[in-house]
Amino acid sequence: EIVLTQSPATLSLSPGERATLSCRASQSVSSYLAWYQQKPGQAPRLLIYDASNRATGIPARFSGSGSGTDFTLTISSLEPEDFAVYYCQQRRTFGQGTKVEIK
Amino acid sequence: EVQLVQSGAEVKKPGESLKISCKGSGYSFTSYWIGWVRQMPGKGLEWMGIIYPGDSDTRYSPSFQGQVTISADKSISTAYLQWSSLKASDTAMYYCALGRYGDNYYFDYWGQGTLVTVSS
């Protein structure tokens, strides 16, 4: 099974700042990677699929990049509602998550 | 409107059996995968397994193979997750989710979650 390692575990930033989250796969997954956002008490929400495609209704400030083993989720300018936990997923595996918290 | 509506919270004792449900609406139930995801208290997401209701093709994570059973009744557009003998370590939130991206298993719609508490 593929292992996904997310870093950092926690990212402390202020509204308006840029967030850069990393997801590394233990072997190449081509571009088959998704990103999700989860807020407390809510189900996860699909943000990005196939590494760089925004899901329906996702704001343009969210972007994904990467291929092979290294992937990045970028939030260009953090809005108050973006403070949450973010997970990457490749088929049957989720990463352990990155918490984006208010500094 | 696509919706996945899960059954309500459960409180069970160790050793008891349980079956929770996930009813899909607003889309062709037999045409897309439905998966189950566990989230233990304060922890991350764990992929448990997935079923294609059209032909009941079911795939499990090695971590959950033999521990749970996933099934679906396409006549009532409902998927199920069941345990034959619960353990305290099964205490978690369980989400069903809809995968409309083929074998990539990306989940674009999620149920509201079913909280399962196992305690003596």
Image (cartoon, coloured by chain):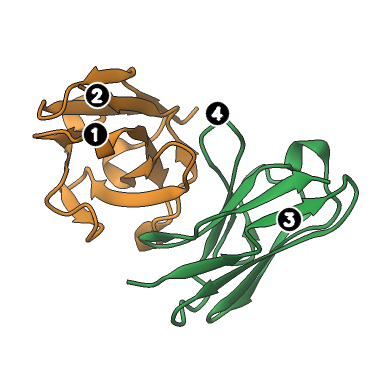
Q: Amino acid at mark 2?
A: Ser
Q: Secondary structure at mark 3?
A: strand
| Tag 2 and tag 1 share a subunit | yes
- In this view, B49 is above or below B22: below
**Mark found first going from the N terminus, 4 or 3:** 3
Task: Give the letter of the orange chain.
Answer: B
Picture coordinates of residue A34 (x, y %)? 53, 59
Helix, strand or loop for disc 2? loop
Q: Chain of mark 4?
A: A
Residue matched to label 3: A11
Mark 1 secondary-structure assignment? helix
The green-coloured chain is labelled A
Q: Which mark is residue A41?
A: 4
Residue to which mark 2 is pinned: B119
Do discs 1 and 3 belong to a common subunit?
no
Q: In which quadrant of the rendered image does the C terminus of chain B lie?
A: top left
How busy is the neighbourhood of tag 4: few (under 14 within 10 Å), some, or many (20 plus)?
A: few
Read off the chain for label 1: B
* Amino acid type assigned to the residue bearing label 3 in the image: Leu
Q: Are marks 3 and 2 in contact (CB under 8 Å)?
A: no
Q: Which residue appears farthest toward the right when viewing the image?
A: A16
Badge 2: chain ID: B
Cα distance in 3D space between marks 1 and 3: 32 Å
How far, Cα to Cα, is label 3 from label 2? 35 Å
Residue A41 image position (x, y, % from top left): 55, 28
Work out how far the residue at label 4 is from the one at label 3, CA to CA, in angstroms: 20 Å
Inspect the image, locate mark 1, and give the three-letter code of the amino acid beneath it: Ala
- Image mark 3: chain: A
Give the distance between the C-alpha atoms of the residues marked 2 and 1, in whole angstroms.
6 Å
